[in-house]
Amino acid sequence: MSFSRRALVSGALLALIVVPVAAGSAATPKPAESVSVIVREGPRAGTGPEQMVQRLGGRVGRRIPIINGFVATVPRSGVSALGRTRGVQSVTINRRLRLHGLLNGWDQAKDPGSLFVARDITNADDMLEVGFTGKGVDVALIDTGVMPVHGLAQPGRVIAGADLSFESQSPNLRYLDTYGHGTHLAGIIAGRDTSGPVAHDAKHFAGVAPEARILSLKVADAHGVTDVSQVLAAIDWVVEHRQDHGLNIRVLNLAFGTDGAQDYRLDPLAFAVEVAWRKGIAVVVAAGNGGAAAGRLNNPAHDPFVIAVGAVDGNGTSTTADDVVPSWSSSGDGVRNPDLVAPGKSLVSLRVPGSHIDRTFGATARVGKTRFFRGSGTSQAAAFVSGLAALIIQQRPTIKPDELKALLKSTASPIPNVSARLQGAGVANMTRIARRIPTPVGTQNFARGTGMGSLEAARGTQHLVAANGIELRGERDIFGTYLTGSLWAPLSQLGNAWNGGTWMGNAWTGNAWTGNAWTGNAWAGNAWAGNAWTANAWYGNAWSANAWSANAWNGNAWAGNAWAGNAWEGNAWSGNAWPGNAWSTQAWGG
């Protein structure tokens, strides 16, 4: 099986509806097979050949000036008609050179969930072919940490930022991904096995932007447990340090979401991502996994400024006619919908041996002999778009977040007969962007958030629970300190919520964020110095001492069983199906 280039789709196409076929009845017709072709034009051909491609239901791709031609995708049945068009000298099937070979016992060229195929579906390799790999662009990943597994372990590939998780006081766990989620997403964004070209190379593993750099902000522990206040602190950290020590943080990937229904104009989490957006950071957020029944995007994906990403199952083909938005990808409300969709079904990325999800789902989710793991969710789709954003920013260094969002939406390929509530503008497609179409000009004019709303409302129904059964509720952060919008929002807006190793007056860090544990990039120890999280950080008797272990945060102090499962965007770490209630105890998902 081979997989060819995805074309931009114009006009109305019939959707593929899969239904049971009764005995003796006719099967549902399959959509016309599309093929990639190279069209060579004669002198004074004009626009006739391009117009014929469109009339056939195809799409014109990039120009090839050296032969006075262009690449196009057309139905196979229309190749002959295109060849007879006035001005066309020849039409040749575009057969790509691919480096085949088993990768850790796995053939990614034949796996519809591989990043090799997912990049092809979105034409991401069109950008790689012309030299845009994400180099020079830093993607902040607020997640469960990143493990230095093969594909991410090269010096400088990942930089450890702040560890704000409950494991930050354990030197052997600090920064590392004991859960397995962050590493999976980091591999999608910027994993890389080889220093050579990766476009159309099935022999090596590569993410979407293989030369982008990951800045890892760890906020969740081995059980995926975290609180909104930790995520707020991480976003503030990214904003304040976005250009420190040679950083160039232009993209923030956030797979976190809650079912909080507070108006985005008040919500603190929505306000935090808006602050990052206005500071020049494109914030990519998972839409959620509540499906069509959700009726709205999760918080903060419901904020209209950010890039909200739903998932698509491309079925490994070059046409959108058979694409499906999985039943679990959250629907919008008709006003605030996903901005676009990207591959998110059964994506294969890097595995963390012994992590929580590896121990829990490894029997069904492992791919190949040792290295890879399969996961589904809008988390994966968001990571994919974060990689695309890094490619675009390298190509267009001065592009603003509003312009980047408009460019992604205007070039997406709509899925026929699928509601905009599910797909937004359609499937991300990089072909026209690679051809350097003009950057859209303009700004989004939505009402800005104030951050003056409720921290408790931002949590929705998900709450941390201490070992003694006390829930973290109300307008308090994890230290028990009152966190009101009137105090926090102005400091966040100014980039002053952090002071050394403290956020809003509380010490969140270990003794130093050295960052040189495995990345090879040393951070000055006094740049973000802070004290250990001790019991003294809690105010008065607001929280029982039983929630603490040895005067420091213990990863088991908060029980994960209070999390409803939809707070983190993803529920599947298996090949084909959602494992029932497998995610009912986690805050982070796939």
Image: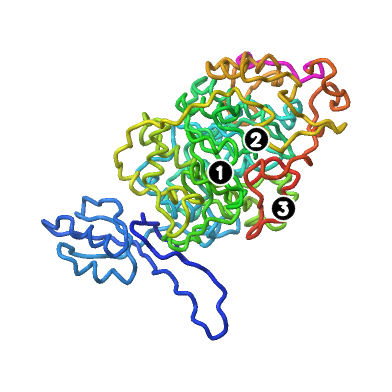
Residue 376: give its label.
Answer: none
Q: CA distance from mark 2 to mark 3?
A: 19 Å
Tell whether label 1 touches label 2 (CB within 8 Å): no
Q: Amino acid at mark 3?
A: Phe
Which residue is label 1 attached to? 287
Number of other residues with Cα within 10 Å of mark 3, as a class: few under 14, some 14 to 19, many 20 or more: some
Residue at 78% over, 32% down = 555
Q: Is residue 260 visible?
A: yes
Q: Amino acid at mark 2?
A: Gly
Residue at 57% over, 51% down = 329
Residue at 53% over, 16% down = 494
**Residue 343 in the image, given as x and y percentages of width and height:** 51, 51
Range shown magenta: 525-537
Q: CA distance from mark 3 to mark 1?
A: 23 Å
Closest to the observer, 272 or 52: 272
Residue 145: give its label.
Answer: 2
Which residue is label 3 attached to? 361
